[in-house]
């Protein structure tokens, strides 16, 4: 079963330096997973925080499932992330450092049909770093065009 659900947070590479990444499960209700399978979710403002040594994702927007009945959910509620204890300890130790945070990079459905979220430990970029990212991306695009024209 190959899933085509792949909801990305495109701002992560531009706004942050990615230090490390983890894949985590998410605790969802039945209507939420149906909405994700319909591609009705957004993680552009999502970040993660600790509550009582458990990691929660805040601001994941999952729209209400259109065929649900009376049991509608809160679209932006905090959702618990499922990681093992060693991964939680690594993330907790990193987050205590100044300037380090945890953001959602990608929301997807794996081969078993389960919703997973890829979270990253990040450090914010300065303005000049963002300019360098744009310049590198533009140079790569120009180089690819030249290679394509040269090989044609």
Image: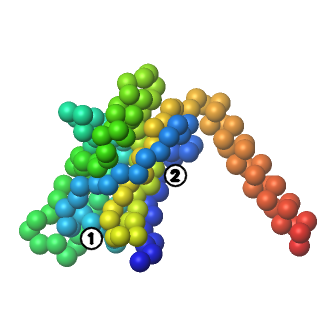
**Residue wearing tag 2:** 10
Residue at 70%, 48% in the rendered image: 137
Residue nearest the observer in this picture, 57 or 139: 57
- Closer-to-camera residue (73/50): 50
Residue 101, image x and y in percent? Answer: 42, 33
Q: Residue 109 placed where, x, y %?
A: 38, 66
Please, which residue is most extreme toward the front here? 86
Image quarter hosting the C terminus: bottom right
Say which residue appears at 75% left-offset and 55% top-offset. Answer: 141
Callout 1: 10 Å neighbours few (<14), some, many (20+)? some
- The residue where tag 1 is placed is 34
Residue at the far right in the pictured view:
150
Of circles 2 and 1, which is in front?
Answer: 1
| Residue depicted at 53% across the width and 39% down the height | 18
Q: How crowded is mark 2: few (under 14 residues within 10 Å), some or many (20 or more)?
A: few
Indicate the secondary structure of the residue bearing disc 1. helix
Q: Which of 54 and 33 is in front in this view?
A: 54
Extreme residue in the left direction: 70
> In the rendered image of this protein, does residue 49 appear above or below residue 12?
above
Where is residue 126? Give x, y as percent. Answer: 58, 29
Residue 14 visible in the snapshot = yes
The part of the image, by quadrant, that contains residue 71 is bottom left
Give the residue drawn at x 45%, y 75%.
Answer: 2
């Amino acid at each position: 079963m190959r899933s085509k659900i792949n909801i990305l947070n495109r701002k992560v590479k531009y706004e942050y330096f990615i230090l490390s990444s983890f894949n985590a499960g998410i605790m969802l209700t039945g209507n939420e997973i149906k909405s994700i399978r319909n591609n009705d979710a957004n993680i552009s403002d999502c970040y993660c925080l600790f509550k009582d040594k458990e990691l929660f994702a805040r601001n994941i927007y999952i729209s209400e499932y259109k065929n649900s009945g009376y049991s509608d959910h809160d679209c932006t509620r905090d959702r618990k992330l499922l990681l093992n204890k060693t991964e939680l300890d690594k993330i907790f130790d990193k987050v205590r450092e100044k300037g380090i945070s945890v953001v959602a990079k990608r929301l997807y459905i794996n081969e078993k049909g389960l919703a997973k979220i890829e979270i990253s430990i990040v450090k914010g970029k300065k303005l000049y770093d963002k300019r360098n990212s744009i310049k590198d991306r533009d140079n790569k695009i120009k180089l690819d065009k030249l290679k394509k024209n040269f090989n044609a």
